[in-house]
Amino acid sequence: MNSNLSAAAQRTVGPVTEIRPGKGLLDLDLRSVWQYRELMWILVGRDLKVMYRQAALGAAWAVLQPLFAVAIFTVVFGIFARMSSDGVPYPIFAFSALLAWTYFSEAVRRSGTGLVNEGDLIRKIYFPRLIISLAGVITPLVDFAITFIVLLGMMFWYGVTPTWQILMVVPLLAVTSLLALAISLWLGPINVRYRDIKHTLPFLLQVWMYASPIIYPLSMIPERWKAWYCLNPMVGIIEGFRWAILGKGNLDLTAISVSAVLIVALLFGGLIFFRRMERSFADLI
Amino acid sequence: MTNELAIKAEGLGKRYLLGGAGKNHDSVRDLLVDTVGSLFRRRDPQAKSANEFWALNDASFEIRRGENVGIIGLNGAGKSTLLKILSRITEPTNGRARINGRVGALLEVGTGFHPELTGRENVYLYGTILGMSRAEIASKFEAIVDFSEIRQFIDTPVKRYSSGMYVRLAFAVAAHLEPEILLLDEVLAVGDITFQRKCIDFAKRLQKQNATILFVSHNMFTIKTMCTRVIYLKKGRVLYDGPTDEGIKRFEDDCRLATVPWVKNSKDMPIEIIGVELADQGGREKTVFDHGERMTLRINYESRRPVATPNFIVVFSRSDDVACCNYTTETDHFVIDQVSGQGTIELRTPPLSLVADTYTISILVREQGFGELLCAQLGGTFHVRHEMFDQNFGVFHEQAQWRRVDGAPTASANPPANLKVVGATDVRR
């Protein structure tokens, strides 16, 4: 009897859950994401293990993929088309931008299609769905780190010495992942309803890549179009990466500010949109 | 203290729009326009739509701490929807619920297992998915592996597991959840009999710890052993909420003479079943039969017009809807000249060789030569009881003759079926 009472007394401390329809527009409930952070990390760990364990070459893929792209771009654009590279060896020029782009596109792909891929979990388990999107932009950071080391090796080979500015890669990377998250907060819920996103996404990303200064320098864009061109939030980011890694030119503050404003707007709107749509995920997937 | 509420639900409702995903948007543009619009419009929960469907409607109940409540009802009655709302997987359309305590929801065993990962990795993955902390899983890891009985394969990728091993490991993790409120959806129905016993033990252990259990099942037998109270849902509404025996009786009475689900228009059928009685050989009414017992089934019918040479068909279907056997007057060469008005027909089965399970009776009447359907109704349910023969032994079990033909001497003849069974269970104890 006594032990029963004390057990019951202990339980009164337990959490209280309120279940009700449609919470307010601005109730983003980010605290629950924090509460479920362990699940997010374990999903990241699972994806990394599976990714590297399934492939015969394992982690080597993370290196080979951008290396192939760099090789192709170097041959096609650097050698055949004689694209300007602002006085830097073309492979390094292309790689410094591809490093950021490869991470960005992989993060958008993972994060944007993650909700549908985790359909089983969403149908049977409760957790803040946002952690799937978060995990999607965190997982490819490991690939980024490996590729970055390869880039440093290549820079050494070509005799390009990094400066202190290379430390700026870290905040720039953070901005990139926020942009990827913002994009997928919009794409993910739409993909739940319209599975065509999965097929359109590679195409969209390819167009976006050519609309960003990756194979060509920003200096090639005519001055009068530049303002419009910089509305692409990846422009400021890519130029930032080049500036940080190659130590040349100036950080384009206008482009970076445009990126920052766009990211904040997309992220905030995306969070509201995601929360709004989240309620029906389990019914639609 | 025990009076304290674990769950309080007030007017819970869940509306689904038929025809797929909500409104039918023709293009992504429509969707965007609509969604942006709906962000700024207040939703009207009472808005009517022609193709809407209330999976749950105005469900209110209070569940006290430590109570074990069974949720019963036919398929599509809203049982799973209720659990999904209470476990926060989906939001209610209206109403509210307040849950007091740590919730563990088991709507499926093994959700989130990844085939490429090892057993060990999956224990951590699945444990976290179910809401345990890493430290909690680490401290229970040995116990989980012991419980699963597959220690030697714990570092093998689970894609190499048999389905049985897979479920055992998943359940071993789930069984180490220590929720204050457990939501269980039919998960006990999987696995072999020893496994099912483990599941029941798990639930009983939680009962002893004064946990609150909400349990959805089709198996009235399990509901009876586990729950003191049932909530009977019908077409999304709470039809009954009270003591188990009364609730199950109401449910079974309701199912008793309903039209079988696959018949579309039952209104024009000329024959109606107005009562079904189950009894043993001695004429005592009952619904639980031992394997090997004979059953007497009395069918009271009413024929709205005279029907010549009708063929009465009785079907027993297992709990998973597999039709297991069929008795028909025509194949048994029992000729009924004509039926008109009220009457009664009696079927006496051979000794039941069906394995232990819950069976649903369907009663069909057709024209001679398995022609036009004249009647198709459910006739209630019954249970077959046996210590050993369950679905793992197939649909039915009967004794066969064995002998050695390689010349070796035979030690003994087959003992009679019943004796053998008693002996076998005694040895196992």
Image (cartoon, rainbow, N blue to C red):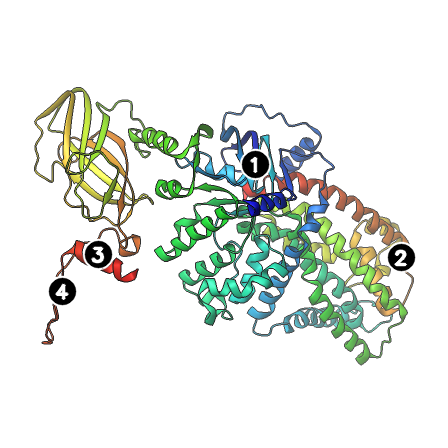
Task: Give whichever of B332, B87 is nearer the camera.
Answer: B87
User: Do circles 2 and 3 both sit on a common chain?
Assistant: no
Placement of A178 over or under B16, stated as above or below: below
Relative to A214, is B50 on the left or the right? left
Which label is found at residue B402?
Answer: 4
Can you tell which of label 1 and label 2 is closer to the viewer?
Answer: 1
Q: What's under tag 1, amino acid-wise?
A: Ile
Q: Could you tell me if the residues under marks 4 and 2 are in contact, i.e. CB atoms within 8 Å?
A: no
Task: Give whichever of A257, A11 is nearer the camera.
Answer: A11
Residue B103 visible from this viewpoint? no
Identify which residue is drawn at 82% across, 74% down.
A89
Q: Which residue is mark 1?
A: B7
Instruction: Using the numbered discs, state the Cα–Cα distance from disc 4 to disc 1 in whole angstroms.
Output: 57 Å
Q: Could you tell me if the residues under marks 3 and 4 are in contact, i.e. CB atoms within 8 Å?
A: no
Q: What's under tag 2, amino acid-wise?
A: Asp
Task: Give whichever of B393, B306 is nearer the camera.
Answer: B393
Q: How many marks?
A: 4
Which label is found at residue A252?
Answer: 2
Q: Could you tell me if the residues under marks 1 and 2 are in contact, i.e. CB atoms within 8 Å?
A: no
Q: What's under tag 4, amino acid-wise?
A: Trp
Q: Could you tell me if the residues under marks 2 and 3 are in contact, i.e. CB atoms within 8 Å?
A: no
Secondary structure, mark 1, is: strand
Chain ID of residue with mark 2 = A
Instruction: Using the numbered discs, state the Cα–Cα distance from disc 1 to disc 2 in whole angstroms.
Output: 58 Å
User: Do circles 3 and 1 both sit on a common chain?
Assistant: yes
In primary-sequence order, the first of circles 4 and 1 is 1
Q: Residue A104: horizontal and vertical position, in percent?
A: 72, 58
Chain ID of residue with mark 3 = B
Instruction: Using the numbered discs, state the Cα–Cα distance from disc 4 to disc 2 in whole angstroms.
Output: 90 Å
